[in-house]
Image (tube, grey):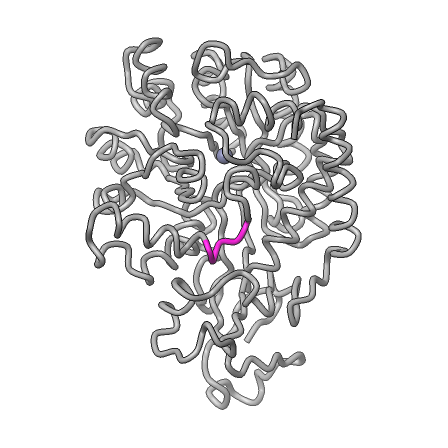
Amino acid sequence: MVKGGRIAGVGREGEIPESRRAELRIQAEGMAVIPGLIDTHVHLAQSLLRGAADDLALVDWLKKRVWPIQGSFTEEDGKLSAELSMLEMIKSGTTSFVGVDVVSRYGFDGIAKAVSEAGMRGALAKTIMDSPGYGRKGSIMPPGLVEEKVATIREAKSMIRKYNNVKGGLVRTWIAPRSLGGCSKELYEEVGELAHESRSRVTMHLAEVREDVEYAKKNFGTTPFEFIEKVGLAGTNSLFAHMVWLTDKDIGNVAKTKSNVAHCPSSNLKLASGIPRIPELIEAGANVGLGCDGAPCNNSYDMIREMKLAAVIQKGRLLDPLTMPATAVLEMATLNGARAMGTESEVGSIEVGKRADLVLIDLKKPHLTPYRDVVSNIVYSAMGSDVDSVMVDGRLLLRGGKALTLDEERIISRAQESQDELISRSRVSA
Ligand SMILES: [Zn+2]
């Protein structure tokens, strides 16, 4: 039972008093109700790159495809890509996300407007940089993506001023310093100060590939996470994506500093970055959420499929079928995600008083029948297309599989044209 955007009652038919019956009743027989899924690491600008950067190693992937195409974005592409990403997220049960990698050329105004219109709970993380590098020699970004230090900070401040906590808190702004090599040491320190002053949360890619470790060792004499601790960015308001290459000491320090982790299993496998030690991080007491990353490295924004992968890769790695059970994985995709976003008192579980971010999954499907432990069926057998309805803050965004706030037909047809135009403008050989 939902009232004023919040969960007002939880129970079976008949358990909720007649006086509190709702005006709108949703027949959900044969469906499971779960908390809205929370994607803690998603590139809104990359859904337009789907299929345009496959089967490449990370550096070639960035240099030959991802950066040149993203460096040719117009603001119209930025908004359209955000809409396409959100359409896919809503249709597969995601209600909250951390949108990383929002560079100036994608146009914040259009993206923030798209999030408001779509009705999702979205954090938009402004990319901060002062160097065109990326943790290794020769990885230089195309001019279209490079931002100067003064401009990048000024724009982050303006974005925070304009968009933090608008739409009743649905839209938030975060700060996203680029990976090691993309910012000077001083800039990371400045980001820490800005985050503190503006009470913004911080997210960044960290310890994703082995080269990140080599870069940190050579340039700072530390591990990537030790460097982050040194510049004051570790802590409860920070969310680090990937964290594949951590030492035992780093794992302890992630937990000790209460830093959050965004685990992106598809991306780590497809780009051959490695398999992060997630059960070890959880065991140490770290908070780990789940993320789909981007279309060129996943290639979908379907958190239900991501849950299955998060469970099975660790069982295979540790030769232990008991590790990462279904309930822990569903929690990773919901409540842990909310903790990583600092919204756990509002969303992430179905409890009276929390905001009504809810998802209905249709279990009347051959691949979901029969069911006994519904959580197991959702994690191991379901897929995003089994989502029937989605509600955020008490507002229906999807009903009967049909998107209510985004124009699906227009977005899909325009996305194809837009990718064709981007490929020809950026002159990549795809
Ligand atoms: Zn990423």
Q: Residue at x 55, y 13 (%)?
A: 140
Question: Left or right of 256: which side holds 44?
Answer: right
The verdict on residue 304 being magenta is yes
Question: Left or right of 15: which side holds 113?
Answer: right
Q: Position of residue 290 (x, y in %)?
A: 42, 47
Chief secondary structure of the magenta portion: helix
Quarter the C terminus occupies: top right
Residue 423 sits above or below residue 327 on the image: above
Q: Position of residue 124 (x, y in %)?
A: 59, 38
Residue 222 sits above or below residue 262 on the image: above
Q: Position of residue 208 (x, y in %)?
A: 39, 29
Q: Position of residue 422 (x, y in %)?
A: 73, 31
To which quarter of the image does residue 256 belong? top left
Which residue occupies the foreground of this view, 368 or 360? 368
Question: Left or right of 310: which side holds 176?
Answer: right
What range is drawn magenta here?
301-305
To which quarter of the image does residue 68 belong? top right
